Image (tube, helix red, strand yellow):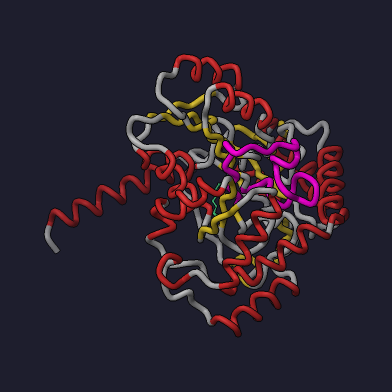
Amino acid sequence: MAESTTDLLVEMGGRLRHLEEQNLLRQRRVVDGPQGPTLVIDGKTYLAFASNDYLGLANHPALLAGARDSLEQFGVGAGASALITGHTSVNEQLEAELAAFVGAPRALHFSTGYMANLGIIPALVGPGDIVFSDRLNHACIIDGARLSGAQFRVYAHGDVAQLERLLAKNTRPHPLIVTDGVFSMDGDIAPLPELLVLSEKYDAWLLVDDAHGFGVLGPQGRGSLAHFGLASPRVLYMATLGKAAGVAGAFVAGHGTVIEWLLQRARTYVFSTASPPMLSGALLVALAVIGTEDWRRVHLGQLVKRLREGLVGLPWQLLPSETAIQPLVLGDNQLALDVMADLRAQGIWVPAIRPPTVRKGTARLRISLSAAHSVEQVDQLVNALRGAAGRMSEGLAR
Ligand SMILES: *Cc1c(COP(=O)(O)O)cnc(C)c1O
């Protein structure tokens, strides 16, 4: 091997060691079997509070049957991009039902949420335009904005006053305001009514990424816009289908003109193989379950309340979230890993989230609840966390 190649690898090895020294090296775990309240991870069974399967649909028998039916009818692969021959009747039906479900004229189905934002944002704005983005927006929003070549301005998390100051100073036409509907690592809901007012006042697009709100918030789980009773032709509503909907993929819904534009111009839509039809088969069933089984959201709400009441008085800050995402901020990277390990020793799996996923000094346990959890399982987590807190403070005293 040429020496210069070896140097490259030595240098990269050094970078990996640097990550390890900062407690930032991430480790994959191997999961066996389907999603559920308990998971087999690296061969051991844990009670898990780690997934985004908020309604417990990822292994729902009716969704499996929906996938199987479409599998029989359409085979495994879509065979081509949607604009060639990959757009099947089941995808067509899914788009129509998604649009109706969120109260928009039309929807476009993407293979993943990441690809959706990488496609949508550069199709809406380009060099010469400007994007205003909440500080805590998801990585794929930031990447989509970068890819667009538009100017990128960040406002402090949820700070509509700062956003208005930035909008008032802006001279570029039709700016884009983009926000998570529910923030993925904090669990709080974006101030959507205020953002819509600003987008109207300053003639801006408003793109809402509702990865964590769709299926969970609003009447029948219609999402964060429905939660506030909002609708507007200047809003683009994007949501993912691998979280509460339990499958995979994403969609964007909005005015027919803008959806047609995205269909023509979103490069991750145009130049990527269409999503497998069997996933659309499962998603049609998911949509029916989301819309009719209110008990899942009611139960989830009860679990959130139970957890929050149970954790009162812990030495760590539970962020003020009313959603399925309940972040317990520990601050220090090593402490977050230590508490995660303590819980794991008790048979409970809660992921520690560290920078760069969250801001430095705000390492946390991201507790995510699902309608598939029982009250007893949440109590088990509460007791385990109380035990861990006691052990951590003893450790400090020693
Ligand atoms: C998970 C997530 C995505 C990415 O969606 P995938 O379908 O998993 O690629 C996009 N935006 C937000 C806010 C997310 O939490």
Q: Is residue 160 left or right of residue 367?
A: left
Residue 41 x %, y %: 63, 65
Q: Is residue 238 left or right of residue 327?
A: left
In the image, residue 333 above or below residue 350: above
Task: Specify the farthest residue to the left.
Answer: 2
Residue 333 x %, y %: 55, 38
Task: Specify the farthest residue to the bottom.
Answer: 72
Residue at 70 percent across and 30 percent down: it is: 397
In the image, residue 396 above or below residue 345: above
Task: Specify the farthest residue to the front.
Answer: 257
Q: Quadrant of residue 307?
A: top right
In the image, residue 247 above or below residue 157: below
Residue 378 seen from this side? yes
Residue at 45 percent across and 42 percent down: it is: 121
Residue 38 x %, y %: 73, 64
* Foreground residue among 313 and 334: 313
Residue at 48 percent across and 47 percent down: it is: 117
Q: Quadrant of residue 43?
A: bottom right
Residue at 48 percent across and 52 percent down: it is: 260
* Foreground residue among 384 and 221: 221
Query: Is residue 215 on the magenta stretch?
Result: yes
What is the tally of numbered marks visible in this picture?
0
Query: Is residue 342 on the magenta stretch?
Result: no
* Foreground residue among 53 and 153: 153
In the picture, the quarter occupied by the C terminus is: top right
Q: Is residue 170 left or right of residue 99?
A: left
Residue 19 x %, y %: 41, 44
In the picture, the quarter occupied by the N terminus is: bottom left
Residue 345 seen from this side? no
In the image, residue 93 above or below residue 349: below
Magenta region: which residues?
211-239
